[in-house]
Each structure stands twice: as C-alpha cells, then as structure tokens.
Amino acid sequence: MKFVIWDPGQTKSSELQSECNEAAWLQKGRSLKEKEARLHQLISKLSSMYPQHTEFLKYLHRSDGDESVPTIYVITPTYWRPVQEAELTRLSHTFQLVPKLHWIVIEDSNTTTKLVGDLLRRSLLTYTRLHVATPQAYKLPANPKLSWVHPRGVLQRNLGLQWLRTNLDAEKQKGVVYFADDDNTYDQALFEEMRSTKTVSVWPVGLVGGLLVEGPLVEGGKVVSWNSVWKRHRPFPIDMAGFAINLRLLLNHPNVAFKLKAEIGYQESLLLKEIVTISELEPRADNCSKVLVWHTRTEAPKLDQENNGSYIFQPNLPCFKKWSVREGVEVGIVQINSVTVSFVFLPVL
Ligand code: UGA
Ligand code: MN
C-alpha cells in the first residue's frame, strides 16, 4: 500500500506532521483491513483540511488492497541511449498518478543497469525489472536511413509476457496488460479507460502513421473501420500504444508472442489477430473521440562536445554526473560537497 503526503499550499505543516505520523502508523505491520480503514479516516481528515482538493485526495487512495480492481501491467522495453533516463523519468512520474499499476521494465541489454535500477527504486512504483538483449543481427543499423528494418522491443515484450504467464494466475488475479514504449506520452486518464478491458480495448493514438491522430472509427459502440493511412491494409492498423489486453485472454493463449521477423508495422496486427476479432474490440476514450496517448519520438540530442574523446571533470557539480559511453557501461564522476570523490574511468571507445 502506498500513501502520498502532499501539502498543496505548504501550509498547516503541524497538522500535516501529525498526518505524517499516521502514515507511519500505516506502514507498520497492521492487517490490510486495518490499514484500509485508517487510510479512509486519514483521507477524509485531509479532505477537510483541503476541501478544494477532496477529489484529488480521494484519487490518492490507490485501493491497492482491493482485489476487485484489476491491476494494470505495463510492459516497457527500454534500451540505453542518452535520453533513456529522461524518458523513463517522465513515464515513472505519470505512472505514479495511476492506482494499481505494476510496471514491468525490460532492458534491451545483457545485464540490468544501475541507471534503470536506481530510477525504479526511486519511483516507489510496484515494478519488475528484467533484461534480455536483442541479437546484434536484429539491432538497428547505425545508418538512420536504414533504421527501420527490424521491429523493436520484441524479445523484451515477450519476456514481459513470459513473466506474466509464470507469475500470475488468471483465476486469482484480475488484470489488464498494456505495452507502453518508453518514448510515448501518456495521459493518466488513459489508464482508467483501459482498466475495465474484457477482451481488447482500443483508442486513438496521436502523432503516428503520418497523421495527427490514427485510430479506430466507431459506430454504435463498435469499431467499424480505421482512420489510418500508413499500411492501412494491416489487419489491425493500430500502434502498440493504442490497445490493452485483458490478462486472462493473454494467459489463455500461452503461445501468443511478438515476432522478431515481422514486417515493419505488423507487430501489433500479428499478435492481435491471434486473440481477438475486430467486432470484439472495446472502444474507449469516448468512442475513440479523444486522444490520451501520443507517439512522441524524442529527437536524438546533439552531443558532439561530449564525444570529442576526453572527459571533463566538473568539480562544481553538486552530485552525480554520469555518462554512459556504451550500452551497459556506466561511467560515474562523483563529487558530493567536496568530500566524496569516487569515479570509474573508462576510456572512450
Ligand atoms: C513503433 C511502435 O510505436 C512500437 O511499439 C513498435 O515496436 C515499433 O514501431 C516497431 O514496429 O518495431 P517506434 O517509435 O519506431 O515505434 O519504436 P521505438 O520507440 O524506437 O521502440 C519501441 C520500444 O522498444 C521502445 O520502448 C524502445 O525503448 C524499445 N527498444 C527500441 C529497445 O528495447 N531496443 C532497441 O534497440 C530499440
Ligand atoms: Mn517510439
């Protein structure tokens, strides 16, 4: 169970302190029922202190102990590049706003890395951390013009699926599975839309397929067609960010997985056509009229000053400056209050 202490106006700090003590009480070995009851009391107290934020405070009650609320299992493949920490930070902050979310992060790497581990620990989210490296033959070529010859995140998402199948029981756990790439932008409201998914729920995705919005067209509560131009004859012309799958449906299809050799743009279709038909799709986001997720793709930053072959030691930096020269290899320069200096120096390759 998680509890967030939040003081909107930085006021009433003594009252807040006593509430903090209550939050500490909640952490101690009490039964779930006791904690839930106390948490309810605490939220109504805070609501009377901050009446203007009652709704928000209610929302903070994450009902983590309520088994009737399905958990959202978010599967995120990720790989090292200069923007990785920024991308994952943005995601983790969005996910912190979502009740009953379990983040499964799979690094495309031979080992787990300190960067991702630290970030996940700091996030206070419920998470699982896995890793599997994409074979070199399936990695993206250096030439950006050729960059899209292989599908991305395939083995990582499959490892996430394997984790679900090994660790969860469809009879006991209610859940929904969502494949959330690390570079997209998610509205917190999207997760409440998908939480009630019975088979596969769908919604529009912004900034993808050469359009401002690509997504299902809905009539009478059913998907009848697609607003899609790029490879529009795909069985499901939809981006990975545009659907979520009921956990039981996935567990009942134990061999369903993404394919390393899929034609570009077909990953989603090849998986979906094995588990669902178009008439079974459940439109969300007001009959697919709202955009709650965007296929943002972060521009690769220009780092030519970093890549000139020498490190610049910056003693004024208050804390960790870290820089990875190659995937999985972390180079740290540490200077904390002029006291601790410890660093790993690796020559630039
Ligand atoms: C589009 C879709 O949005 C992806 O879901 C789909 O995997 C991809 O096409 C495809 O068909 O392969 P795009 O923005 O081009 O996505 O892909 P990325 O965002 O670069 O990669 C998708 C995910 O895989 C990201 O979470 C990324 O961190 C991860 N990835 C990418 C790796 O784990 N390893 C890599 O070498 C590259
Ligand atoms: Mn992407």
Image (cartoon, grey):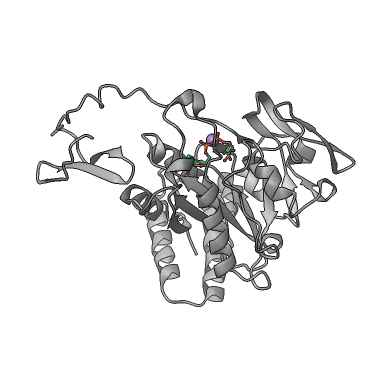
Q: Residue at x 10, y 41 (%)?
A: 338
Q: Is residue 217 left or right of residue 347?
A: right
Residue 44 shows up from this direction: no
Residue 82 against residue 30 in the figure, above or below: above
Viewer-closest of 186 and 323: 323
Residue 219 x %, y %: 88, 38
Q: In terms of image quadrants, where is residue 217?
A: top right
Q: Residue at x 65, y 23 (%)?
A: 210
Quadrant for the C terminus, please: top left
Q: Is residue 203 left or right of residue 104?
A: right
Looking at this rendering, what residue extends furthest in the front direction? 137
Q: Residue at x 46, y 41 (%)?
A: 137
Looking at this rendering, what residue extends furthest in the left direction? 339
Residue 152 x %, y %: 53, 41
Residue 313 x %, y %: 14, 32
Residue 160 shows up from this direction: yes
Looking at this rendering, what residue extends furthest in the right direction? 220
Viewer-closest of 109 and 316: 109
Residue 189 against residue 62 in the figure, above or below: above
Viewer-closest of 116 and 235: 235
Residue 332 x %, y %: 21, 43
How many numbered dots are placed on residues in this image?
0
Q: In terms of image quadrants, where is residue 317?
A: top left
Residue 312 against residue 77 in the figure, above or below: above
